[in-house]
Image (spheres, helix red, strand yellow):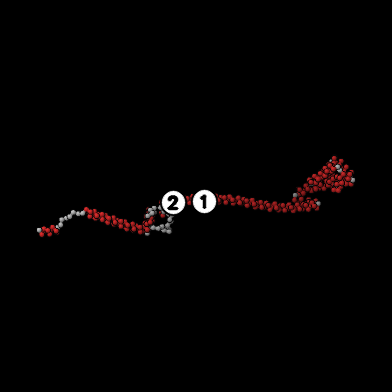
Amino acid sequence: MAEKAKSTSRNPKPTMQNPEGRSRRILQGFLAVMLALVIVAMVFCGVFYIILKNNVYGLGEIFRPVFQDSPILRLALPPISQEADPDAPENLTDTEIRKKYVEYRQKVADLTTELNEAYGVISQYESDLSILEENKAVLESNEKLLISIQNEQERLEQQKLEVAELIAEGNKEGFMEYFAQIDPETAEAIYKELVRADINNQIKTELAKPYAAMDPTSAARVLSELWNKDQETAIGVFEGLNANAKALILEKMEASLAAEITKTLSDKMLIK
């Protein structure tokens, strides 16, 4: 019996396994595997982050178009170098590209508007400049014309003074010489007129001599008759008389006739 008991203790019978312990062990194994996978993933992500951040083999720039749109993944991208263009399409997200496109279109529209306004201002300046040049040319022409007119006025004033002096002096020869220098044809016509006037004055003086010698009453009676028959001859006689004789004769005439003769003499003097 003792030997049997020893044999039994050396070879114990297998006992029934606990299900709860088995499930626990499976769960622990699963968790261990998951933890290992997480650690491996974290290590991989860390290594990948370092590779991208340092742009190893240019992987950071390669993955930039892929990660640029993600606010989290883009943190792993290397910073854009100062030499790189931040507005380059490869450095922008799709949203930023669309935004930049809208901005560029607006800038182009604004610049086009400003350019058209500038063209309008330039065109107005050119028009104003053309008008200014035309006005300047007209002004210069008017200034030259004004100077010419002023010179002509000065010349005419000088000639007027010369003519006045000649008339005051009664210098017919000088008067004719003056007009001969200006216009020979006019001088000839004036000369003929002066000669004719001189002859007429001589004739009138000769006609008036008898009446100047008569007494005023007789002269007044004869000239009244002559006036009724030939007014022109009567006026010629009066023009040949000196002022004193003329006054005495008119005094002896009827008032209406004296007034008519005086009026005729005055009109002829004004015409001259």
Q: CA distance from mark 2 to mark 1?
A: 22 Å
Mark 1 surroundings within 10 Å by alpha-carbon count, few (fewer than 14), some (14 through 19), many (20 or more): few
Quarter location, residue 22: bottom left
Q: Which residue type does callout 2 highlight?
A: Lys
Side of 117 relative to 44 (left or right): right
Q: Position of residue 18 (x, y in %)?
A: 21, 54
Side of 164 relative to 220 (left or right): left
Tell me which residue sits at (80%, 52%) in the image.
168
Whether 229 is drawn above or below 89: the answer is: above
Residue denoted by label 1: 114
Q: Earlier in the sequence, mark 2 or mark 1?
A: 2
Residue denoted by label 2: 99
Do the CB atoms of the residues marked 2 and 1 lie less than 8 Å apart?
no
Q: Position of residue 179 (x, y in %)?
A: 76, 50
Q: Which residue type does callout 1 highlight?
A: Glu
Q: Which mark is residue 147?
A: none
Where, quadrant-wise, is the N terminus in this rendering? bottom left
